[in-house]
Image (tube, rainbow, N blue to C red):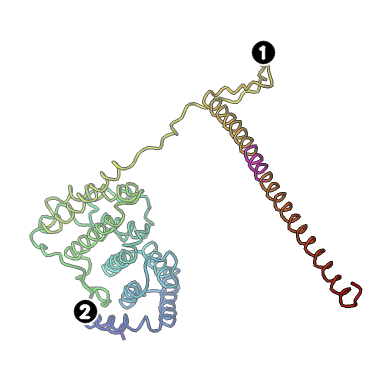
Amino acid sequence: HLAVLSEQDPPVPPRYLDALVRHLGELAPLFPENVGNLCRDQTIKFQKQLSSVFSGKTRDKAIPMASQIVHMRLFASLFSATDRFHSVITPMVMVASQYLSQQTVATRRDAAAGIIICGVLHEVHRLSRRFVPEAINYLQSLVCAIGAGAWKDCSEWPGYFPLPGPQKRAFGSFALDPMDNLIKTEHSDAGPIRWRWLVSDDEGDDGLNTSTKLILLRAATKQLRKWSDCYSSAPAYIEIFAPVEKALSAIAATYAGTLPTAVLDQLVTVHRQVEKHLSDARRKRHPLKLQHHKPIALASVAPKFEENYSLDAHYDPDRNRSEIQKLRRLHKKEQRAAIRELRRDAQFVSFVQLQKQREKDAAYERKMRSAWGTLEQDQGELKKLEKLKKLEKKGKL
């Protein structure tokens, strides 16, 4: 139902789409596996359509459809975009990057769809800050195409990615004339991208007119500003945005008296921001240096002889290391001496304790012997007395 509503012409008010998305956001956590499989299937279907169009098997196919862009934005809001590998987000990012890198931008619909997809990718990567070169290259190429009057031909555009032949020819219809003084007066209202451009196949004479080019230029520079903020702390910021800064500078200088005030102000603002980030990045970047230590001597193969060599002496050329080894040997020597003294003390203490125990045992033995002697004597006297009593009874006494 969301796909059907997003394809309506004239477009459905955004509040209806937002209401559906809110319900989907509440239902998705209840059935995460089913929702994930469904979204992944939608992404696979979109990729097959892209491959069919790019390979020439399908002709005159308006791709991506507005519903597919809505699905991409929905996936970015339903699932975690910070995971390094995600079963839904990672394939979606790869398909979006494939579109940005392989699509021949020839109409306002192509340009608008690419800018919106760049915005979706920024929403995905704004926290993880992963590098998406396809988005930067797409936005920079589109800005250069609209401001192509700043250069003689597209071979002079700043950047690292060359344009294929069909794209060079298609970008020829995007250029603004820097000598057209009517642009500033007749097209002062460059608003946002219109959703109708994605759902309507008939552009007519109102396709790539001056107003549309200004809208695309403003939207592309706005996206470049977001990506610049996203990568401001990246170590490779200079390599990423130095060509963007050159392009913005050249376009702002060439079209200073041609562009409307709102568009020119935004262009200058984005250029100043990129320039400031480049200045900060250059200030933070330091050249690589060798480690701070003394030069390491080359290994010598010549044998080293010592006169009056002694086994007891140590011939370490490093004085500090020699002193450390000396202290270690002295420490071990003192440790062994201390252990010997402790053992002697322990032996003496145990000997004294043994002597005391022996004396106690001897005194106890003498005491027991005296007690046994007394008992034996008493026992003998008792037996004599009993014997006399027996004799007395018999009358022998």
In the rendered image, the residue lying farthest to the top is: 307
Residue 62 visible in the shown view = no
Residue 14 disc label: 2
Q: Position of residue 272 (x, y in %)?
A: 19, 49
Q: Position of residue 143 (x, y in %)?
A: 25, 56
- Of labels 2 and 1, earlier in sequence is 2
Q: Are marks 2 and 1 in contact (CB under 8 Å)?
A: no
Q: Determine if the magenta segment contains residue 352.
A: yes
343 lies left or right of 75? right
Q: Position of residue 144 (x, y in %)?
A: 27, 54
Q: Nearer the viewer, residue 189 or 76?
A: 76
Point out the stretch of residues depicted in magenta: 344-353
Principal SS element in the magenta part?
helix
Residue 200 disc label: none
Q: Determine if the magenta segment contains residue 104.
A: no
| Residue sitting at x 15%, y 58% | 263
Spatial distance from mark 2 to mark 1, Cα to Cα?
95 Å
79 over 349 or under it: above or below: below
**Quadrant of res 95:** bottom left
**Quadrant of res 394:** bottom right
Q: In the rendered picture of this protein, how many numbered marks are placed on residues?
A: 2
119 over 356 or under it: above or below: below
Q: State the residue position of label 1.
A: 307
Q: Residues within 10 Å of mark 2 (few under 14, many from 20)?
A: few
